Amino acid sequence: MPNSRSQSVFTHYQVFIVAVLSFLQFTIVLDFMVLSPLGALLMEQLSIAPGQFGWVVSAYAFSAGASGLLTAGFADKFDRKKLLLFFYTGFMLGTIFCAVAPDYHYLLIARIVTGIFGGVIGSVSFAIITDLFKLEVRGRVMGFVQMSFAASQVLGLPIGLVLANAYGWHAPFWMISFVGIGVGAVIAFYMKPIDEHLKIKSDRNAFQHLTKTISKSNYLRAFLTTTLLATGGFMLMPFGSAFSIHNLGLTMEQLPVLYGVTGVFSIAFGPLIGKLSDQLGKFKVFAAGSLISIIIVSIYTQFGITPLWIVISMSVIMFVGISSRMISGSALMSGIPDAQDRGAFMSINSSVQQISGGIAAAIAGMIVIQVDNGPLQRYDVLGYVVMCTMLISIGMMYYINKDVEKQKNEAPNITLPQPVVVKTV
């Protein structure tokens, strides 16, 4: 096993897996994130209140969470490639439904359909990563895969906003559909079957597999931590564009610049954060990222009319902190499940994330008030809630880290064959 501090490369097939999962995550993340910058446009054109827009965001999350729970018992019973293709096809259909939605209620239903399929894709992807990559290098893998969040800002959100300003809010969903169909074709033709986990004999049926996974104490602790991790993004992000326009004084034309510059820096820092989490320790990077995020959120949510360059600077620092939390937290969480439980654990964990995030988005819609298309009120209250959850999550992640260290020091459970990470000469 190579030392985590040594320079290493992956096999060619591993590089392909990282690339294709990154593109796949790009479409999934963009489909969700594009609603945030479109928020101001949607609320105006569909004549809906912040609370209704909050439900558009949370509808995806609730349906994704329910779907993840329903499929958790079956997640380790099928070839992961086939499972990935099935749900990605449904996700693409849901996105097309969003692209043709004529009104608020149709869009709400389309988001539910998209969530039913899209909510499972992330968990299957992380199960694939856990199957094919050793824990010592998963920080780097997560660093590249999580770059999809930044790439969706640099490439997707600015293009989506330009299309929305030129052709209406439906256009970004058409863009996602066309890109997603190409990604799905690459997976179908070039990804190999991922079925090594099927060789581990188990006499559990789907329901027993689900209940056994839920009942493990260290798994429950991880699910509770995920609940706290989801709160921050789902509370602040949906109203980010509306806050930028109505409170910070930016224009719709400036939003692509804001998201684009922030995304460029996030792409640059993503692999570095992943490498640091492998070398310095995933918990240390998570804690540092959380503290940075807390400081920036405490300042950002208090802003009034602010010059664009200051907003960009604060956004860059905040996203570096958030990326540090996401990359190191995801890598650390992947060390929790046993080999025979990976699919179920990831599905349940994804469901917990989506459901808790949906509740957070709905609550955020109730807290935030907007009168006569004026500034958003009580956005600072959301900031206080987010800061509290971030503080608590540091303590929770400390115990997750102890669980992972304990598993590494004890006799290993059944493990799956994994491709060798080749040390550079």
Image (cartoon, helix red, strand yellow):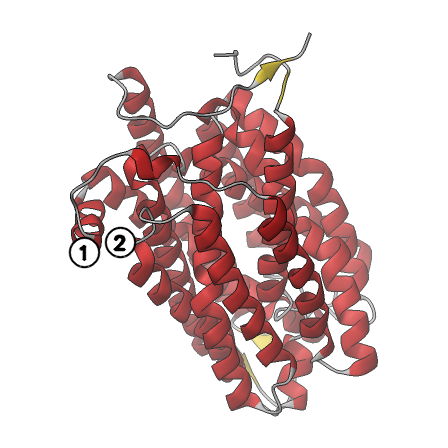
Residue 185: give x, y in percent of width and height.
64, 56
Numbered mark located on residue 149 in the image: none
- Label 1 or label 2, whichever comes before in sequence order: 2
| Viewer-nearest residue: 364 or 260 | 260
User: Element type at marker 1?
Assistant: helix
Q: Is residue 383 visible?
A: no
From this view, report whether residue 328 is shown above or below residue 420: below
6 sits to left or right of 130: right
53 sits to left or right of 372: left
What residue would you read off at disc 2? 73
Kindly indicate the quadrant of the structure image that contains residue 270. Answer: top right
User: Element type at marker 2?
Assistant: loop
Q: Is residue 23 visible?
A: yes
Mark 2 is surrounded, within 10 Å at the Cα level, by few (under 14), some (14 to 19) or many (20 or more) other residues, namely many
Q: Residue at x 76, y 70 (%)?
A: 161
Residue 318: give x, y in percent of width and height.
62, 48
Q: Residue at x 32, y 59 (%)?
A: 71
Q: Quick one: which residue is furthest to the top in this view? A: 425
What separation in Å lies between label 1 and label 2 (alpha carbons)? 6 Å
Residue 334: give x, y in percent of width and height.
41, 36
Q: Amino acid at mark 1?
A: Phe
Q: Residue at x 47, y 68 (%)?
A: 115
Residue 20: give x, y in percent of width and height.
63, 45
241 sits to left or right of 326: right
| Viewer-nearest residue: 255 or 60 | 60
Q: Quick one: which residue is furthest to the front in this view? A: 189
Q: Residue at x 76, y 56 (%)?
A: 155
Q: Amino acid at mark 2?
A: Gly
Are the residues at dot 1 and dot 2 in contact (C-beta closer than 8 Å)? yes
| Viewer-nearest residue: 264 or 231 | 264
What residue would you read off at disc 1? 207
Mark 1 is surrounded, within 10 Å at the Cα level, by few (under 14), some (14 to 19) or many (20 or more) other residues, namely few
